[in-house]
Every structure is written in structure tokens, then in C-alpha cells.
Amino acid sequence: MIPKSVVVNRKKYFIHTGKPQRFKRAYGYIDYTPGVIHIHTTARERPVSSSKMQETFWHELTHAILYEMDHPLYRNEQFVTKFSTLLNRAINTAKL
């Protein structure tokens, strides 16, 4: 499930899902200053699965957390991808 908004530190990030306006080949991206996480419903002119959209949400949220921590890894796609993939897997396999 992808939320409509989330607060990181003291900054509220709104989550927008829909067809890409920018970066049409990507699954999503983040605009730090206005505080918007974009999750694409299509990429490369094909529908994006709900599981890929969820994975993309965690990826962009990882960027936001690192950015709000003023940590230089917020720009490191390799780190963010690995961390968010493991986070998404842990959340999806959690037993309640």
C-alpha cells in the first residue's frame, strides 16, 4: 500500500501516483524542495505492477530519509537501490 503522504523529520512529502510527467523511462523520482515523491503507473510506455510501485515508493522514501539526514548517500543510486530493495523485502515478508 502506498500512502498519500509521509513526514520525514519535519518535512511532509506528498506521494503522487500517475503517468510520468518527467523521467518517462523511470519508475519514479523525488522532488526534494516541494516535497513530492512521484510514483509512475507507466514506464517505458508499459503499465507498472503494484509490487514495482511499492518497491519504487521505498526507494524514493530512502532518498528522502537520507536527504533529510543531510547524508551524502542520498545521491548514491547503488546504495539507495540495495537498501530499499532489502527494506521492501523485509516489510513484505514480515509476520504479524
Image (cartoon, grey):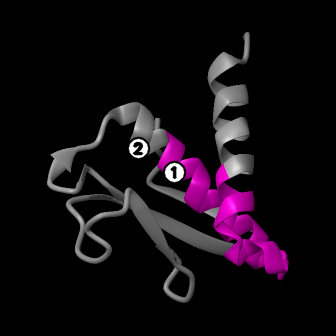
SS for dot 1: helix
Q: Residue at x 51, y 51 (%)?
A: 57
Residue 54 to residue 26: above or below: above
Q: Quadrant of residue 21?
A: bottom left
Q: CA distance from mark 2 to mark 1?
A: 6 Å
Residue 82 pos. (x, y %): 71, 48
Question: Please, what is the three-letter code of the amino acid marked with disc 2?
Answer: Met
Residue 27 to residue 51: above or below: below
**Contact between labelled residues 1 and 2, with CB atoms less than 8 Å apart:** yes
Label ID, residue 35:
none
Residue corresponding to mark 1: 57
Res. 3 visible in picture: yes
5 relative to 88 in the view: left or right: left
Question: Please, what is the three-letter code of the amino acid marked with disc 1?
Answer: Phe
Q: Nearer the viewer, residue 69 or 23?
A: 23
Magenta stretch: give its range. 55-81
Residue 72 pos. (x, y %): 82, 80
Q: Residue at x 53, y 78 (%)?
A: 35
Q: Residue at x 71, y 71 (%)?
A: 76
Residue 22 pos. (x, y %): 28, 77
Q: Residue extending furthest left?
A: 45
Q: Please tell me how crowded label 1 is: few (under 14), some (14-19), or many (20+) other residues with Cα within 10 Å.
A: many
Would you say residue 35 sits in the magenta stretch? Answer: no
Secondary structure predominantly adopted by residues drawn in magenta: helix
